[in-house]
Amino acid sequence: MGDLGWIFISTLLINNFVLAYFLGLCPFLGVSNKLEVSFRLGLATIFVMVVTALCAWILNTYVLIYAPYLRLISFIVVIASVVQLIEMAIKKLSPTLFRALGIFLPLITTNCAILGLAIFATNKGYGLWEGLVYALGAGMGFTLAIVLMAGMRQEVEKANAMPKLIKGFAFNLIISGILSMAFMGFAGLFSSS
Amino acid sequence: MAKEQHAYEEFMKGLWRENPVFVQVLGLCPLLAVTNSAINGLAMGLASFFVLLGSSILVSLLKSYIPKQVRISCFIIIIATFVTVVDYSLAAAMPVIHKELGAFIPLIVCNCLILGRMEAFASRNTLRMSIADAFGMGAGFLFALVALGGVREILGVGELFGISLFGPNFEPWVIMILPPGGFITLGVMLLYFNWVEEKKNKLDKQLAAEAGVN
Amino acid sequence: MNLFRQISKSLSSSLGSFDHGVHPRHHKGQTEQLAIQRLPFGKRFVIPLGQHIGAPAKAIVQTGDAVKRGQMIAEPGGFVSVALHSPVTGRVTAIGSERYADGTFQDAIVIEADQYDTQQVDVNPIDWESLSIEDFIGEVQKAGIVGMGGAAFPCHVKYAIPDGHNIRYLLINGAECEPYLTNDHRQMMEQTEELLYGAEIVRQKLNAEEIVIGVEKNKPQAIKALQDTIKPGQPVRVVPLEVKYPQGAEKMLIKSVFDVEVPAGKLPRDVEVAVNNVGTIIAIAEYFQTGKPLIERVVTVSGPGVSYPANLIVPLGTSIREVLDFAGGLTEETRQVVLGGPMMGESIADLDAPMMKGSSGVLALTENETGRPQEYNCIRCGRCVEACPYFLNPARFARLAKSRMYEEMAESYNVMDCVECGCCTYSCPSGIPIVQHIRTAKDHLRSMKGKVQ
Amino acid sequence: MSEDKIEQVAGAEEPSPARLIGTLAIAGLLSGVIIIAIYLVTFETIKENKARELRESVFRVIPDVTKMQKLLLKEGKLVVSYEEEKGEEPIYAGYDESGKFMGYAIPSDGPGFADTISVLYGYRPADRKVIGMWILASRETPGLGDKIYKDAKFVADFDDLAIEPPIVATKKGKKKPNEIDAITGATISSVAVVRIINKGNDYWVSKLPEPGSEPVYIEVTPPPSEAGEAKAQ
Amino acid sequence: MTQKDPKLLIQPGPQLRQQMTTPVVMRDVWYALTPATLAGVWFFGLGALLVLLTCIAGAVLTEWYFAPEEKRGYFLGDGTAILTGWLLGLTLPPALPLWMAFIGGVVAVGIGKTMWGGMGANIFNPALVGRAFLLATFPIAMTTWTAPGDFFTIPSSVFALPLMQGVVDTVTQASPLGLMKFEHIDTPFFDLLFGNTSGSLGETSGLLLILGGGYLWWRRDLDWRIPIGILGTAMIFSLILFIVDADKYPGPIFTTFSGGMLLGALFMATDPVTSPLTKKGTWIFAIGIGILVVLIRVFGGFPEGMMYAILLMNAATPLIDLYTQPRVFGRELDSK
Ligand SMILES: Cc1cc2nc3c(=O)[nH]c(=O)nc-3n(C[C@H](O)[C@H](O)[C@H](O)COP(=O)(O)O)c2cc1C
Ligand SMILES: Cc1cc2nc3c(=O)[nH]c(=O)nc-3n(C[C@H](O)[C@H](O)[C@H](O)COP(=O)(O)O)c2cc1C
Ligand SMILES: Cc1cc2nc3c(=O)[nH]c(=O)nc-3n(C[C@H](O)[C@H](O)[C@H](O)COP(=O)(O)O)c2cc1C
Ligand SMILES: Cc1cc2nc3c(=O)[nH]c(=O)nc-3n(C[C@H](O)[C@H](O)[C@H](O)CO)c2cc1C
Ligand code: SF4
Ligand code: SF4
Ligand code: SF4
Ligand code: SF4
Ligand code: FES
């Protein structure tokens, strides 16, 4: 397994952002009731993450070596502006998508998965390519998790059988727990042999 | 005096009745990510508390100068500033804890609880009320973090704040400190809150019914 | 992928069948060797005005009127409606509310038979060859002929082919896939000539090229009788079909015989086919040969709860009780009496209700057949999905109906395409009355639609 | 402040873009000032903490050392470095009180059971042996994988370990000088540590100078932390 | 009024039903499991029987506790709680402390089933949820395999006090999968077939498991596509690897007969509730499991991947169901 390959598999499956790092829980729990929307949000997240990785690398390489203390602020500001641009673009290109994602597009910005990506990639000292692959893996891992979750939630909501008491967040958290348990099966993948 | 009462109300609201975690289910990411022990929960809780309090004060003070159009950006900048302050202070004063919490301190910026409070409360209320609110919400968040961290630590390693509870032969429940344990424990705690709430509602109804009969 | 489809397609068509469906035991042994007998005339006949799909007929006789056997007593109430005729010579004793098989009350004409009449009718052949298609349709409507396959849909409506459509095949439905029933079987054996004669009439009137008769393979005698009677050069073909329920549902039959799917929401004529039941065609033949309208039909009386099962010619309007009594009455063990086949038929609430044009069978069932398993939650075993001949998703229907998500059933899962054949309920190990759920959903959806309009 | 006043502020006619940008700029400036202030206040301590941590780790993996210095690979040669330099992986040389070279501390990382494991290990070129191992960072399972640093016996296995042929983790009891005992229940993590060290050796051993010609400890230079601090000021 | 025929039933059609009912299906699975269970108890001794019974007790008590009072008989009557506990028990190490087994049963039914609304509503296989929970919670106890031994000797670990560690005082021995994964040692085929190896309580006798599976297939209780799909895929995948490097990777026979492969493929992946509805979906499900098992076994961190493979495909089942809806008769004909 090459390094890039391992970075990808690792963030996609083993260290899945949602299921192992608890990042991006708000959209994961908030939007995962509709499959279609989840999938689109996933795609949007992949895109924003890749852009973020690019921005983070540029900032790291050209700005932050001179002013490390600006790391957090500059990440936030740059990512927010980029997402703002994307939001405007989506509004123009696909009003349906814009409506479907509703309030969640701005939430992607203040989504800790995005900031977490930038910070983790920096902490790990990833270069440009590594950072981009990391972002791709993280975004796709997020999409995978949220799409699986949405499928399950749609199913159980149709069956509508669960006890009233547990409906809602408690239930979704426990499903996430089981999913996270299932994803533990990927631990150690490609690192044992 | 009435004011005093009010502030107290705000505080209790955040701590229990509208607990940001157990009732409003906000700020889950930092909550789950760091609560594999009570001490980490405490540290994270205090850090968030500080950021919330500081930002609330600043936002409440500056609210009339911030134009509506850029208020979110301003809030974020303010919050990010306080987070940076916490980050550096913690790194300087408590390097061990800082290493444990790792990358999650900067992520306080994204905690929607904090931004939400700025938007919904601090930017619309007096300094005094904002402080009370920040105290309440911060304490509520802190309480949730410590509770969750405590449960996970007790079962996960058989200790609380590093003090062994069950003796050396205890079989730790490893899952509790792993990610699935975080999800499941929080889910079960929410379930418990729902249950308490429902019981209370039932009791209230019963009391009301009895009052009606009398 | 395409290749794969084609192979599977050619395979399935060579078997002469459709996909999915169920294989209930067919229980036809009790009656399949019994020749058709005539049920003696009873005393009191009840002729409901609305015994077919469409508008009820309008009575044209009054209480006290004397009527002759075969005389028209009600005229069609619209285009999708047919005439009614008196099954006996006698007197009209009442016109009013009478009890139906399902327990409801509906308007009917009650006729007291004249005990001393011979009940003979004059033979009055009709020269069908000179009739225009419009007149032919009028005659069929006047003869009161409806589909005898169970639905009792006015037959002439099917023959009113709109411009731009034409019929290439007249498909005669001799599948008789419902367990227990053997009336079509016996008619194909005993009235082969009439069947072929009637088919020829309809073929010529519709300008169809060929007559195709689909018969399930478990009726070899019927297949042989048909093949022996067909004259060389006659455009008639007999197609043996796999024994499987619901082979006789018209869209399944068309798929089995021609390997063509009738698009959802479309009719057989859209694929250039007209489908008629064996009994329907024989009724047409009899009408044009002798002038006798639809006043009696062949009924199978069977089931473990009947002492002497039989295939009977029953004058319409005879009470179910008389039919059963003729067959030796019900045994002690009988729990349920069903009008029609056991899959599509309905339970009878009242044995004094009359036999109607669409009543193909009277079945007496015992605990063994009627006992229902306790209902359990759906275990998603997929048996219903594998059973549904329309490739619907009954498990999903059951689930959605329980949470009252009717709209989604229609929008995402095409519940309205369900023909209520019952395969899903039949196959469900958890004893879920899926068809019932579907009916509820459809009713709800129809009433919602009504409200919107 | 009452609700309606807020409404007033909000409902007033669109503030000019200049005002908006101005507000943001002021906010940015304000926050910049605060951030730089806290940075300056804490910088020294943080730097010191980090340096101390590093020193502790290095001292842990090379026995009997009291001094260390950072080395970087430049044009194929190891040179002493005092500054933060990007792009190059540093290693550290340890010396005893008398300034005698004792060994290198080499950082290396690779995939473990959960996430990347970062290892620092001591290497003595004289007899081509690993002389100590310490885990800098890992997310291995508590109670299982974390034995790679909590299990003293496992850590001790690396105190005297030949690197040729490449180190192997065995489950049958170590017999050869290049073997360590895998931790029962954490075989994967044990093997991962071994692989990470082998990877470090593959990269570094050929690049190190001949035994005996290691860079000497240069007393006069200020320690790295002071260099950094000087720069910041 | 016609009250002369009071006995007549009025019920909606269809009047006929096929004979199989859900409780009968579940009981068939009990019967199918019996031979392999007896063999497991025979090899691992009375301790194993205790572990199994404790699991069942945990599962049944949980079902009983959460069932509405008036419907308890109905809830327990379908036989699935016992089956869940039983299957969970079969996947556990024979010397597991009883208190852990009990917790496994409680979690299996509580989180795996009741929480979702009872039988039929769950998405994950309850027994495997229980097992996954136990494995992640007590990883050491759950991977301590005892060698088959004396029938009457019960390892003292079985009686460990609640919350306390168990001390295994009988012979422990790596399971065939562990030997293969970490030491590349093959186990003789004969042992795999007859179960004289260490491993989970009920997974060791390949032959008897196949016998039980065959019975279920004969009774039409399970969908043959699932075991065939899983085993076929896993065999092909491992054959390819075996050809690439026979020393490093296990061969197809070993893959099929070792560990939980047969138990999982025949009894757990086939759980109708948690597998797709349609034939096409079933194939996708089975092939997915086959690939994941070999992937995890060969390249992953665990010697055994069956449980995770099934759970992961369980999670994907709603999506599979959604995208393998059969084409409704007479619809979208032009898309052919
Ligand atoms: C589930 C189902 C089963 C049917 N089975 C038969 C059958 O066995 N024989 C038959 O003649 N008609 C059967 N029908 C009715 C046919 O679909 C069709 O309406 C009939 O053959 C048309 O002829 P008719 O109008 O002359 O009755 C069935 C319908 C359904 C929905
Ligand atoms: C409004 C309406 C118009 C119909 N027109 C025709 C028709 O023109 N030709 C035809 O073959 N069947 C026609 N049908 C009958 C159906 O195709 C079908 O035979 C009838 O619903 C009974 O089906 P079954 O006997 O299979 O249950 C019509 C049905 C309705 C409700
Ligand atoms: C929840 C869980 C966590 C585990 N964590 C680790 C780990 O961090 N490192 C490791 O090497 N093995 C870990 N394992 C065990 C491995 O999967 C594998 O079984 C073990 O390395 C085999 O070693 P053994 O053959 O010595 O028992 C874990 C197992 C479970 C169930
Ligand atoms: C063939 C077959 C296999 C089954 N496998 C399992 C299983 O692996 N685990 C389980 O908890 N229940 C199993 N069950 C029982 C039942 O389907 C299960 O408890 C449901 O998931 C409960 O809703 C099985 C049932 C059948 C018919
Ligand atoms: S707003 Fe932020 S903290 Fe709140 S739930 Fe959403 S992501 Fe979590
Ligand atoms: S009407 Fe029903 S019983 Fe008769 S042939 Fe058709 S499907 Fe079979
Ligand atoms: S009743 Fe409807 S859903 Fe059920 S099998 Fe028949 S057509 Fe399909
Ligand atoms: S046959 Fe019954 S139990 Fe099986 S999937 Fe269909 S509805 Fe569910
Ligand atoms: S807190 Fe992580 S996405 Fe919201």
Image (spheres, rainbow, N blue to C red):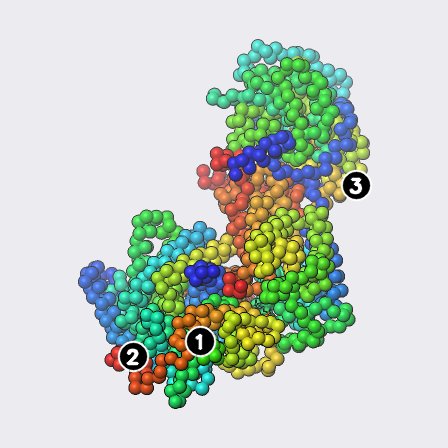
Relative height, residue D91 to residue C88 (above, below):
below
| Chain letter of disc 1 in the image | D
**Numbered circle sitting on residue D120:** 1
**Numbered circle sitting on residue C333:** 3
Q: In the image shown, does E221 or B21 lie closer to the viewer?
A: E221
Residue drawn 74% across and 24% down? Answer: C221
Instruction: Report, in whole angstroms, how far the alpha carbon at label 3 lies from the one at label 1.
Output: 87 Å
Residue drawn 58% across and 27% down? Answer: C258
**Numbered circle sitting on residue D228:** 2
Q: In the image shown, does B164 or E229 lie closer to the viewer?
A: E229
Relative height, residue E329 to residue D67 (above, below):
above
Q: Where is residue C349 shown, x and y percent of the image?
A: 69, 38
Q: Where is residue E68 shown, x and y percent of the image?
A: 63, 61
Mark 3 sits near ligand 6, with its Cβ under 8 Å away: no
Q: In the image shown, does D85 or B198 lie closer to the viewer?
A: D85
Q: Where is residue A22 shown, x and y percent of the image?
A: 45, 66
